Image (cartoon, rainbow, N blue to C red):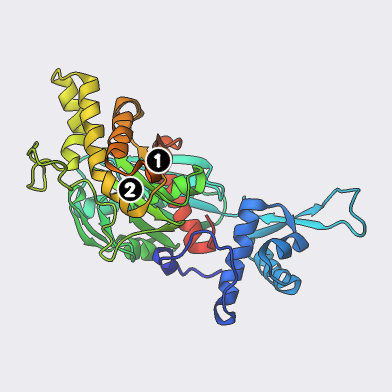
Amino acid sequence: MTTDVAGFGQRRALRPSTKLLPEQARAHNRSLVLQTLYRNGPLSRADLARETRLTRVTVGDLVAELIDESLAIELGTRVDGNRPGKPATLLDLHRDGHRIVGLDLGDTDVFRGAVLDLDGTILHRHDVDARALTGAAATRAVHELATALIALADRPVLGVGIGSPGVVDLDGTVLSAPNRGWRNEALQRDLQLALGVPVIVANDANAAVLAEFGFGGASRDLMLVMVGYGVGAGLLLDGTPHFGPRSAAGEIGHVVVGTDGGEPCACGKRGCLETWLAVPRLQARISAGEPRDEVLRQAGERLGIALAPVVGALDLSEVVLSGPAELLDGPLAQATVDTLRDRTMEQFHGALTVRMTALGADIVMRGSAVMVLSARLGVS
């Protein structure tokens, strides 16, 4: 099985559904078979041929290859008394044949990690204290966490996926993560060399939006807004992740919202979305005695102001919020919806959904698993 992971960041749909030209076909058709098994299995070889519109010969050759690599497995014959002839042998993705390691580096206090199966189920967890870790010390902690999780895996590790704060390019280099003291940190390259397994690094909000699509039942066009110590977003357009030419798509935390000034921001401006919405800012205002619902309503209004041009320009159908539900769900989410509807055309965006993620605090780790599945197998 190839260990190339460079394809994850390319602008391509996550779920292949059509055939390509002959010179491109084998890798694509392999992913097409894997994707069909992943979402629709178990299936027979004849079922696969019908579903993928590939020839039976092509399906047979690909299935034999996938079985040899422990990526597909025969489950036995189908019990169906209504079908004439020899019973078909059912196939499925070998869901228990490999493990994935997922890391979430977004919290300022802790690096979280997990061992997952190919369905995104968390099998083992392991965290490390990350308080005050910056630069090389932070990188060493990530390496130690990944090493410990790989040791917990009871199957071959398909890859390690990492959701990192900051701006991360398509090669997995953290261009800027000030809270960790990382600048042009080649995290993906260095960890892959050190660990000896494929590694994929992306921005944590971009990982989260993949989890929402892969495991959360989200639509193919959505923005996921991640609210924590900062504010970021992941964007999916027609099932394709959008990163931007400078890998900075979704960096909405330092967009100034409104023209009424606002609190100073760490970036040097005033009134950035982060000053209204980041969890420490919300908690500080509430602790200082400001009315809780009013604080949350104002934050939701500013989020709606920031998102309205994006929703209008991209015709998004869904906005998903990820962060502390006790702060985001309720007055904040409702004010976001109200503001969006006030600032966009109701004819087209009146049915826009704004909701909390159902994946909770595990969303980045599970999104990291989707990154590995997409990069290594072409499935999600």
x 33%, y 44%: residue: 345
Residue at point 26% right, 58% down? 248
Label of residue 352 in the image: 1
Q: At 68% from the left edge and 64% from the top edge, which residue is drawn?
A: 67
Q: Callout 1: 10 Å neighbours few (<14), some, many (20+)? A: some
Taking 207 as reference, is 293 above or below it? above
Examine the rendered structure and indicate whether residue 120 appears above or below residue 379: above
- What whole-number distance in Å separates the C-alpha atoms at marks 2 and 1? 9 Å
- Furthest residue to the bottom? 23
Q: Is residue 243 depicted above or below 229 in this figure?
A: below
Badge 1 element: loop
Residue 194 appears in view: yes
Q: Amino acid at mark 1?
A: Leu
Mark 2: amino acid? Val
Secondary structure at numbered mark 2: helix
Query: Closest to the observer: 49 or 95?
Result: 49
Pinpoint residue 116: horizontal percent, then vertical percent: 51, 46
Please give left or right for residue 101 compared with residue 111 in the image: right
Q: Is mark 2 in CB contact (under 8 Å) with mark 1?
A: yes
Q: Earlier in the sequence, mark 2 or mark 1?
A: 2
Q: Tell me if residue 150 can be seen.
A: no
Most foreground residue, 42 or 330: 330
